[in-house]
Amino acid sequence: MRLTSIAAGIITLALGAYPALTTIQSRAAAAPRNGLQGTPRGPMSSPSSSPTSEAPPSIQQDAPVSQQPLSVQTTIVNVFATVRDRHNGIVGDLTKDDFKIYEDGVEQKLAYFTKEVDMPLSFGLLMDTSGSMHFILDAEQDAASTFVHEVMRKKDEAIVLSFDTDVNLLADFTEDPQVLRRAIRRAQINVDASGIGGTGGTTRQTGGGTNLFDAIYLAAHDELATEAGRKAIIIMTDAEDTGSKMSEADAIEAAQRGDAVVHIVLISDPRATEGYGPGVAAKIAQETGGRVINVRNEKDLEKAFDIISEELRSQYVLGYYPANVKRDGTFRKIKVEASRPDVKILARKGYYAPFQ
């Protein structure tokens, strides 16, 4: 199925209630994912023409019938943070008292804290297979296969997508690294490099191109949104978008609503005089709490995946109940600080409150 009409996806995105909140539910009990099912190598379809988003599950307790009903809902916000020192080393010995967290400038009381290395991880691995990637696709496949082997633990799960003029689901959610590696090897260049215009991801053209924003939107909204626990999207791309129906803002909002951190392995053709989309990559990563790692050769690729793997396995989990209890669907800005000087904190910048 090629990408069909995506206008309704915009409506779903605007109206859907996908807050970045912990839901008390296991993966086995998670709601079915919308739209995209795992037919290897088939182009992914866009969100359906009728909105299918549902309000998130909540814990509800009703008073006796003779009394006024009383609803009790849990809305703990979890923030996953990676801390590095001035030498870029992982800082793993901080305590709860070392952190402060703010929502819209108001300090929040931490209700939960842990250094988490074993919490199940759900991630999407997105591979740019447009013509501009032909020179490094084999290296992408090697590095991605090694990454899957090294990062995955028991109960982790992942999907593999490729994108060019279509978004292709190569492997639906699976816990089997072998299935994922075979899917990675099926990725292939679909578009002749001479047919791609260099728009740097800022101008979209109707009728074809590199659908980076569509790929992020579909991975976050259709696949990761209903998964529990830690979620990430890792993208290998030059960050050029020339054909998406969704905008950069749509892609970022879908990732934020799906509580997915986006890491971008930014691949630059050493023969090119300019990078395609470093600004696009930086904005997407920054707004979702991820990072951009610049790559120009195979050795850089291996290092990039080592960095991402280390960060995914070296995170602090900070949980709080928002002082602002309004369920108004607005975006809430988050800021995390540490008392230790000269450290850098990588954490998402906010979340969307539930809407009622």
Image: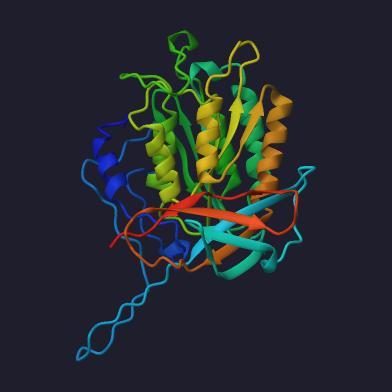
Chosen colour scheme = rainbow
Residue 93 percent across, percent down from the top left:
76, 61
The answer to whether residue 38 is seen in the rendering is no
Whether residue 318 is visible here, answered yes or no, is yes
**Residue sitting nearer the eye, 192 or 247:** 247
297 lies left or right of 5: right
* Residue 216, image quadrant: top left
> In this rendering, is residue 235 above or below 353?
above
- Quarter holding the N terminus is top left
User: x, y percentage for residue 147?
Assistant: 66, 40
Viewer-nearest residue: 60 or 177: 60
**Which residue, as the protein is rendered here, is positioned at the far top?**
194
Give the vertical position of 9 relative to 247 (above or below).
Answer: below
Q: Quadrant of residue 96 in the image?
A: bottom right
In the rendered view, tell whether residue 30 sits above or below residue 139. below
Q: Where 65 falls versus 348 (above or below)?
A: below
Residue 326 lies, in percent from the top left, at 35, 65
What residue is drawn where x is 45% and y is 61%?
21
Q: Which residue lies furthest to the right in this view?
A: 87
Q: Residue at x 46, y 12 (%)?
A: 192
The percent position of residue 105, horizontal first and vertical second, equals: 50, 57
Residue name at image x 58 percent, y 18 percent: 275
Please identify the quadrant where the C terminus is shown: bottom left
218 relative position to 287: left or right: left
Using the image as rendered, state which of residue 146 and residue 252 is in the foreground.
Answer: 252
